[in-house]
Image (cartoon, rainbow, N blue to C red):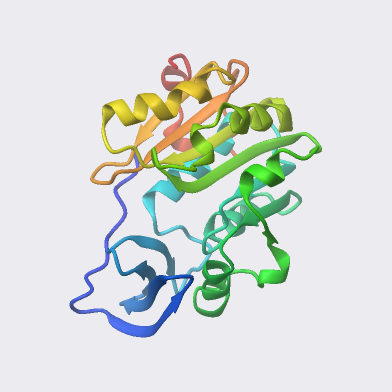
Amino acid sequence: MLANHPTPDTRVATVRHREVSDGVQYAVYDQGDIRWLGTSDGAVQAAVQLSAPTTPVMQYIRTMLSGLALTPRVDRVLDLGYGCGTLASSVRTAFPNARVVSVDSSHAMVTLAHRWLGGAAPERILMTRAERFLSQPQLPVSAIFCDLHAGRSEGSPILDDAFHASAARALKEDGVYVLNLLPRDEADAVALLKPIRSHFPHLWLSPVIGCQNLVVHARKTACKGVNRAAPFADVWTPALLSHH
């Protein structure tokens, strides 16, 4: 499997910017060739390699991107939870003809990402809640990325069966649904996976070693092969695809 992503050392990093927005304290700091966006609770929200901004730094982003190997054709992609935009830019780099629609509800996060991490201008991101957007009629897509930093918290759409039902309706029969979850423990993971499984019977779970992240790759139908044009597709083998 892919190596774990590095973590910043704030004791030696150079602080580039601080601000408080919507009650959240953000900090942007550099450590070597990596620029990080973090919050006062110690959480790393995003990271970019300054010399190669389309190369994902965070391991869970790489694991999510590998899910594109589970769909035969990448033409339309929904990116729910834009963050700093590394995932969206990586998809466009790998599949230049794909249409990527990005959604985020945090104007502060998108603005910081644009100003400091090379993300797209806020005007190019649909500023709305993911569940509201997903509930609207959609053209069928080949992939849905859901990076809402979701654990079992009050108000999280990830616990709502209707959210995953909307995702299933928006996805092509051979498409892939990729989620980044943050379960507190095994019981929390089971609670998060239960509503997903009711709409997507084929699941692959990818824990990120040393991190809370649990990446879920889900399909409505069995996967018949690997799309080798996808980023990090080499993590998928016939043996892995035969189990779910």
Left or right: residue 197 versus residue 38 is right
Residue 213 higher or lower than 170, as above or below: below
- Considering only vertical position in the picture, is 10 above or below 172? below
- Please report the residue visible at 29 percent of the width from the left and 49 percent of the height from the top: 4
Foreground pick, 213 / 3: 213
* Rendered image quadrant of residue 57: bottom left
Q: Position of residue 114 (x, y in %)?
A: 58, 74
Q: Position of residue 238 (x, y in %)?
A: 47, 19
Measured as percent of width and height from the top left, residue 166 is found at 68, 31
Residue 98 seen anywhere in this rendered image of the structure: yes
Residue sitting at 43 percent across and 42 percent down? 154
- Quadrant of the image containing the C terminus: top left
Q: Position of residue 204 (x, y in %)?
A: 44, 25
**Residue situated in front as seen by the camera: 242 or 61:** 61
Find residue 193 and report its image quarter: top left
Q: Residue at x 70, y 46 (%)?
A: 133
Residue 12 vs residue 47: left or right? left
Residue 231 in view of the camera = no
Residue, x 71% and y 34% (percent of image)? Answer: 73
The tally of labels here is 0
In this rendering, position of residue 209 left or right of residue 235 = left
Quadrant containing the N terminus is top left
